Image (cartoon, coloured by chain):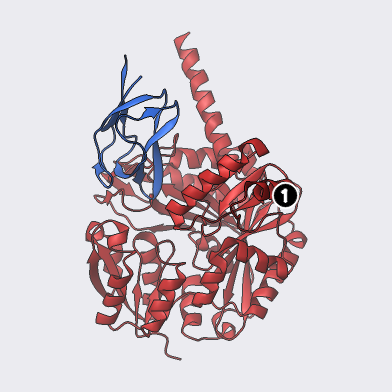
Chain colours: A red, B blue
Amino acid sequence: MPLFNKVVVANRGAVAARVLRALNAMGIRSLALYSDADRHAPYLELASETAHIGGAPARESYLNQDRLLEVARLHHVDGLHPGYGFLSENAGFAQRVENAGVRFIGPSPRWIDAMGHKTRARSLATQHGWPVGRGSDVLAGDPADVLRAADEIGYPILVKPAAGGGGIGMLPARSPAELLEVVERAASMAERGFASHEVYLERLVERPRHVEVQVLGDRHGHVAHLYERDCSVQRRHQKIIEEAHAPEMPRERIAPLLTRIQQTLSSLGYDSLGTVEMLLAPDGEFRFLEMNTRLQVEHGVTEEITGVDLVQAQVRCAAGASLGDVLPEAIRSNGHAVQARVYAEDPKRFLPSPGTLTAFLPPKAPHIRIETGYRAGMDVTPHYDPLLAKVIAWAPSRAQAIDRLRDALDDFAIAGVKHNIPALSAILDSEEFRRGDVHTGLAMQVVNRQKAEATQEQGKAWQ
Amino acid sequence: MAMTQLKADVTGSVWKIVTSAGQALQPGDTVMILESMKMEIPVIAEDGGTLVELHVAEGQAVSEGQVLAVVRE
């Protein structure tokens, strides 16, 4: 079956490079795009053709739908891969791409739309027997109703944007006294961030783990799962260390969830790569969080343990291939993989740190995989997210994978911007992480402990 | 009367100015929000006071350490 003649990658940096490598491996011609800031970016060298799409700010380039569609037409592409971020979960854009006769390499727009609205996604999950925590519908204006809804759920409460995602714009409320003000603030943040003031309430789970399930569907009603990942190590609700499998997770505990998700999405006809995100509360209960209808930043750890190239599989399914022709008959897993996200940011305060990379030398070692969009001499601009590189380590056991990752981070030479390798290393070294005692508060716990120790050392030096 | 300069923590751009010159500020009030690498960084008047000078406009690029506004305590 012919796949695509030419695919445009509507993204930049590490994910553009990742998708272009997959297209090259399948012999599909490619078009890479660049803004003013990415004129000399290394990912462009992987593409058959390149096109300039606009100024450095994302809204003038990677978010500029009209320009992207114009370039797709001028270059006669028949597929568009959105990567992650930018327009990857914009149902309106996906529909415009399809209307232009170009296949959007992702799910049908109706799926993006259904999962993009968080309370609608929650009710779909509830209907199909997925575990869902207590929560409300989108809040209407009446303060008495808001307070009543919160009382039914119980405090502490998390106020979340209905059109949001990725952990942005969520605010906790610990008592009725502060609830209404928090709701108002959250609604105004949601309006700014997602152009919708709709917010809803969820029971706040303290110290949860973040466990997610990778799925792949074709366009013929088949869906497979490719096991789970643990992405509990986060700062500001953004993942920084991810692994597969989830540590300290007996198979009999996760297997029913994997099967249930696979069966539901199969019966509903989910038709692309996707990830179902769950919180795992300290009480051992899973709770549905959201479904991402795109490739994830952390897809590499799943690839490392299953041997499946998820991007190639996604492209083949989008072209109409059947899951049976794309995946091995039984998807097996082997060993353990851990990924660290190296960000250009201050390791203590987690603030972004743009600048010029005067040195940038990623480590090379067996079973170490690097995904990056940078090379030495390039500017890290304030226009895009601060990801410098993903470092992925595979080994037969979790302990060995952590050791390999730790060594690789030590060997990563970066100068010219501040970076978070000291924080990543401290987390990988911590006893809690080593024994698999992970939760979303762990990163801050380790960093704060380090700060306290440093202060103590300083105190001693003065005595 | 002490004057405090509010400086940019990061290189980026001014995303939104949520106050105006002459406005009274409570301690901890947000004066403006910077944007860098997809992150919003609020600029906060820790001690409150009166916003006497505003040195930047929305959309303007700023460098780390640049004076953004002046508050009189």
Residue in the image at 26% along x and 64% along y: A34
Q: Mark 1 points at which residue?
A: A153
Number of labelled discs? 1
Left or right position of A300 against A436: left
Q: In which quarter of the image is residue A330?
A: bottom right
- A449 with respect to A257 (left or right): left
Name the one closer to the observer, A10 or B35. Answer: B35
- Above or below residue A240? Residue A111 is below
Q: Position of residue A384 (x, y in %)?
A: 34, 53
From the top left corner, tell me how far across and down residue B9 is, in percent: 34, 34
Name the image quarter holding residue A98. bottom left
Residue plotted at (43% across, 52% down): A192
Task: Please report the residue visible at 61 percent of the width from the left and 37 percent of the height from the top.
Answer: A178
Q: Position of residue B12 (x, y in %)?
A: 30, 44
Figure check: A272 above or below B14: below
Q: What residue type is labelled 1?
A: Ile
Q: What element carries label 1?
A: helix
Left or right: A281 in relation to A415: right
Residue A126 in the image: above or below residue A71 = above
Residue A230: x percent and y percent? 61, 54
| Residue at 39% in and 84% down | A4
Judged from this view, the residue extending furthest toward the bottom is A1
Q: Mark 1 lies on which chain?
A: A
Answer whether residue B43 is visible to the viewer in this image.
Answer: yes
